[in-house]
Image (cartoon, helix red, strand yellow):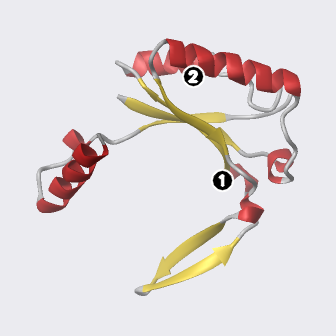
Amino acid sequence: MRFMILVKATAASEAGVMPDASLMAAMGAYHEELAKAGVLLDATGLQASSKGWRVCYSGGKRTVVDGPFAETKELIAGYTLIQVRSREEAVEWARRYPAPFGEYADGEIEVRQLFELDDFEPNAGLARFRDLEANRR
């Protein structure tokens, strides 16, 4: 089972405020623990939305909209991707996640389970994804 731990953005992260050394140390120690346990797949921080864009789909057309984006509460500042045996194990790892903006700063993480190919009914499109997955290995 794969889960993504999403770090919700704040006004400070959107302003480009970088984490201090103690927070970087805590995050490093946490991610080292994940790696030693063999559950870490990927992790990184994301640059502010001012350096990104969205593609909006409407009426068969695509429109590119440059950031920044106003609703900070809807933005992601970083993520950690883990693979564990159960939801309960994912919850335990998430409880141990360091406060993302410092121990006394407001912050929030959200954890979402990823779909696995076996979650979908077999079809031609799914077969293409299975081929892609096999080629990645």
Q: Secondary structure at mark 2?
A: helix
Which residue: 68% across, 64% down?
A: 52
Snapshot quadrant of residue 127: bottom left
The percent position of residue 104, horizontal first and vertical second, equals 86, 24
On the question of residue 102 being in view, the answer is yes
Mark 2 residue type? Ala
Q: Position of residue 5 (x, y in %)?
A: 56, 34
- What residue is drawn where x is 85% and y is 40%? 18
Q: Nearer the viewer, mark 2 or mark 1?
A: 2
The amino acid type, in three-letter code, at marker 1 is: Glu
Label pair 2/1, CB-CB below 8 angstroms: no
Indicate the secondary structure of the residue bearing disc 1.
Answer: helix
Where does label 2 land, which residue? 94
Image quadrant holding the C terminus, namely top left
Q: Residues within 10 Å of mark 1 (few under 14, many from 20)?
A: few
For marks 2 and 1, the one nearer the N-term is: 1
Give residue 119's position: percent from left, percent from top. Answer: 23, 41
Residue 78 shown left or right of residue 12 in the figure: left
For residue 99, above or below residue 134? above
Any part of residue 98 in sight: no
Q: Residue at x 12, y 57 (%)?
A: 123
Residue 96 placement (x, y as % from top left): 63, 16
The residue wearing badge 1 is 74
Quarter-of-image position of residue 93: top right
Viewer-proximal residue among 80 and 60: 80
Q: Is residue 103 above or below residue 70?
A: above
Query: Toward the viewer: 65 or 104?
Result: 65
Q: How many C-alpha atoms fall within 10 Å of the one at disc 2: few (<14), some, or many (≥20)?
A: some
Q: Quadrant of the N terminus?
A: top left
